[in-house]
Image (cartoon, coloured by chain):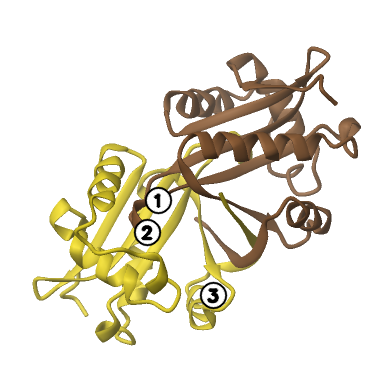
Chain colours: A brown, B yellow
Amino acid sequence: MDDLLMRRATIDDIPAIVAMLSDDPLGAAREAEAGHPSYTLAFKEIDADPHQTLAVGERGGEVVACLQLTVIPGLSRQGAKRALIEAVRVRSDQRGSGLGKRLIEWAIEEARARGCVMVQLTTDKSRLDAHRFYLSLGFTDSHIGMKLAL
Amino acid sequence: MDDLLMRRATIDDIPAIVAMLSDDPLGAAREAEAGHPSYTLAFKEIDADPHQTLAVGERGGEVVACLQLTVIPGLSRQGAKRALIEAVRVRSDQRGSGLGKRLIEWAIEEARARGCVMVQLTTDKSRLDAHRFYLSLGFTDSHIGMKLAL
């Protein structure tokens, strides 16, 4: 397990990240070819924003996991910062190996290092394995996640 | 209803915002005196971040509502931006007047104007009125909101 390297994503990681976003029951219908210019544009925006961390997990020289962390300052809770986790993916051939746990634990440590008092995320109601996974890591399913497509 | 003015919050709005955050079944135990320096520090961080909009609703010269909008770039959904809404409050004496609907509709328009394809938020499972409210505005309760205190 100790061969996982977590690092900030570079523009060259886009194809591997998009492949993971696409290889997913919910994501498959939502993504385009990895070469689509919209991904490069979005990457540059993420990379230029000091409150964003797009991270990948590398194993044996290959990108096998990703997630995005957003640090959000706020007035609530006495001016506390919170971290939002989005776009969590583990490459399908690497699942069940404890890699997801390592990935989220890395994100939790990163959030703590950035002064956040809370980490939050939403997970689709249909992702039952994900619910059990996050609960096992100490998250509480205290909220309802509402979405509105524009 | 047309007397509601939505505008970007200024540092002078902190006391009114903190009063609304505190006047809440869940928020009461979490907040400090509005003069606490942590609120000023947090306000400055929010205000300096171009991806954050802390907005207040003013009526008759008084701040009667607030919310915070965060624009989040991402690779998912073909490089789409999403907007997160946090810290939604309507002053208790103004509830039931349609003001909350105006507030969220303003946030939705702001998110659209900033190029977001989705608006999302989480609401505590205990806030039953809030669930009905967001569903009535077209949100779907498709997700579970997970939180982990650090």
Q: Is there CB contact under 8 Å for labels 2 and 1? A: yes
Whole-angstrom CA distance, mark 1 to mark 3, is 28 Å
- What residue is drawn where x is 19% and y is 76%? B2
What amino acid type should be assigned to the residue bearing mark 1?
Ala
- What residue is drawn where x is 81% and y is 34%? A99
The answer to which of A76 and A121 lies nearer the viewer is A76
- Dot 1: few (<14), some (14–19), or many (≥20) neighbours within 10 Å? some
B128 up-or-down from A141: above or below = below
What amino acid type should be assigned to the residue bearing mark 3?
Leu
Residue where numbered disc 1 is placed: A80
B94 up-or-down from A66: above or below = below
- Local secondary structure at mark 3: helix
Q: Chain of mark 2?
A: A
Residue where numbered disc 2 is placed: A76
Does label 3 lie on the same chain as label 1?
no
Residue A36 image point, x, y percent: 62, 25
Q: Chain of mark 1?
A: A
What amino acid type should be assigned to the residue bearing mark 2?
Ser
Does label 3 lie on the same chain as label 2?
no
- Dot 2: few (<14), some (14–19), or many (≥20) neighbours within 10 Å? many
A6 up-or-down from B141: above or below = above
Residue B116 image point, x, y percent: 46, 46
Residue A78 in sight in this render:
yes
Q: Which mark is residue B135?
A: 3
